[in-house]
Image (cartoon, rainbow, N blue to C red):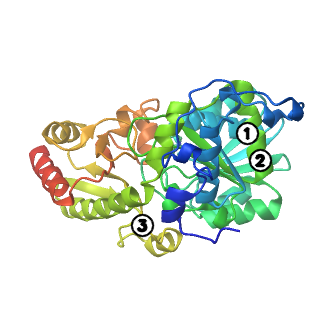
């Protein structure tokens, strides 16, 4: 039995083939669609290895590493975060079932639960994620699962996550959580009672803005059901993307550590700047819910923040033009700092009134903080804010 090790060690060593393949220290890429079949294992589905079945050596090593990082019974990688999330929701929910999900979900997930699920006869209620009581109130006899996100986009709220997991357990429901924004370095949902953890590995797990990938981890029976659906629908990750994700994941701890530090420093600078009306960052100790969030995320508060500019959309335009380090681009979790305006990207599908009701103004800027030198970032952002006023 291997001793229980910390995540920094597991990122490097868990799931690696033993013995190493031809002695290779880095996991080689198995760029082979199919593998020799051993007649002695006829009838055993796992004996048939094929890229679409997500079971080649690259898939297996990644799945083992991810399961270890999340402290989960099993994990599976997928072609994208949405392949994992859609596959998981379809594996858990059958026609006639009911889902209670948190309001303000990631855009792709919001579309899936409000359009795709109703089209197959699954009913959905969206509730305030801050309290488990709002989930409890929405539960019906047909409710099958509860769905939340660790840190919400773009206002970076952290709900009563252990409360939601406990409620699901008490009522015999499946608890599902999208842990993309926190990553297993900051938060491991299984340790807080969640059944199923979903990831867009495109973001922090890969960390280099060069791969699209997803994963599900959790109870073995649930992950197996998702794996089966992915095999049917073709949501497999290709071996080269497996290799890049595998390589990227090894540095998760050092990257996220640096991103948390940089984001906290930027959040305080923004908080003090006259061009900024409001800063959304879970790590600001001036928040009324800071103490609760600190116990949930003791290692750090993540690399995502957002802020409202006093001058609205016009000020955001001037701010973006004056920046020389952060890049104006969607997506997140990479080593480079990115900025984007949610009103024209992730939430462009809503009317201005709907956005205002959610607290997403036209001057709201979302920032995915990278690992650049903090003094350079502070100087550049401060200078661009000055230019925006
Ligand atoms: C990006 C993202 C997704 C979707 O992942 P893809 O890899 O783009 O399919 C899902 N959830 C969250 C929180 C995300 O940020």
x, y percent for residue 162? 64, 66
- Say whether mark 1 is within 8 Å of ligand 1: no
Mark 1 and mark 3: span between their CA atoms?
31 Å
Q: Quadrant of residue 352?
A: top left
**What residue is pinned by disc 3?**
300
Q: In the structure shown, which secondary structural element does the residue marked by tag 2 occupy?
A: helix
**What residue is pinned by disc 1?**
226
Give left or right: position of 79 versus 307: right
Along the line of sight, which residue is nearer the eye, 145 or 49?
A: 49
Mark 2 closeness class: few <14, some 14–19, many ≥20 residues within 10 Å:
many
x, y percent for residue 244? 46, 39
Mark 1 and mark 2: span between their CA atoms?
6 Å
- Contact flag, marks 1 and 2 (Cβ < 8 Å): yes
Which of the two discs, 3 and 2, labels the residue nearer the N terminus? Answer: 2
**What residue is pinned by disc 2?**
222
Give left or right: position of 19 versus 49: left
Along the line of sight, which residue is nearer the eye, 361 or 321?
A: 321
């Amino acid at each position: 039995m291997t001793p229980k090790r910390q995540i920094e060690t597991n990122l490097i060593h868990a799931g690696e083939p033993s013995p190493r393949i031809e002695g290779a220290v880095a996991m080689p890429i198995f760029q082979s669609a199919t593998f020799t079949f051993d007649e002695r294992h006829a009838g055993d589905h796992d004996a048939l290895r094929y890229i679409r079945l997500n079971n080649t050596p690259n898939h297996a090593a990644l799945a083992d590493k991810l399961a270890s990082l999340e402290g989960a019974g099993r994990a599976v990688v997928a072609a994208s975060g949405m392949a994992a999330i859609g596959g998981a929701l379809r594996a858990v929910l059958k026609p006639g079932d009911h889902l209670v999900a948190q309001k303000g979900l990631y855009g792709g997930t919001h579309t899936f639960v409000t359009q795709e699920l109703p089209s197959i006869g699954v009913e959905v209620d969206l509730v305030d994620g801050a309290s488990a009581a709002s989930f409890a109130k929405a539960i019906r006899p047909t409710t099958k699962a509860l769905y939340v996100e660790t840190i919400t986009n773009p206002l970076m709220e952290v709900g009563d996550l252990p409360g939601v997991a406990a409620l699901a357990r008490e009522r015999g429901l499946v608890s599902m959580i999208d842990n993309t924004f926190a990553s297993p370095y900051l938060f491991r949902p299984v340790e807080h009672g969640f059944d199923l953890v979903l990831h867009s590995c495109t973001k922090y797990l890969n960390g280099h803005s060069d791969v699209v990938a997803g994963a599900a981890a959790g109870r073995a029976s649930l992950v197996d059901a998702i794996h089966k659906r992915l095999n049917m629908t073709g949501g497999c990750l290709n071996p080269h993307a497996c290799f890049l994700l595998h390589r990227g994941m090894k540095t998760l701890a050092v990257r996220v550590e640096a991103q948390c530090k940089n984001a906290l420093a930027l959040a305080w600078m923004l908080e003090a700047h006259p061009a900024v009306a409001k800063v959304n960052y879970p790590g600001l100790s001036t928040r009324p819910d800071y103490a609760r969030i600190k116990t949930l995320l003791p290692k750090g508060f993540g690399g995502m923040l957002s802020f409202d500019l006093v001058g609205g959309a016009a000020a955001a335009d001037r701010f973006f033009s004056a920046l020389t380090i952060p890049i104006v681009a969607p997506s997140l979790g990479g080593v480079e700092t990115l900025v984007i305006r949610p009103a024209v990207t992730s939430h462009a599908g809503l009317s201005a009134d709907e956005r205002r009701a959610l607290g997403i103004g036209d001057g709201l800027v979302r920032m995915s903080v990278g690992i650049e030198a903090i003094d350079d970032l502070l100087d550049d952002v401060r200078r661009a804010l000055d230019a925006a006023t």
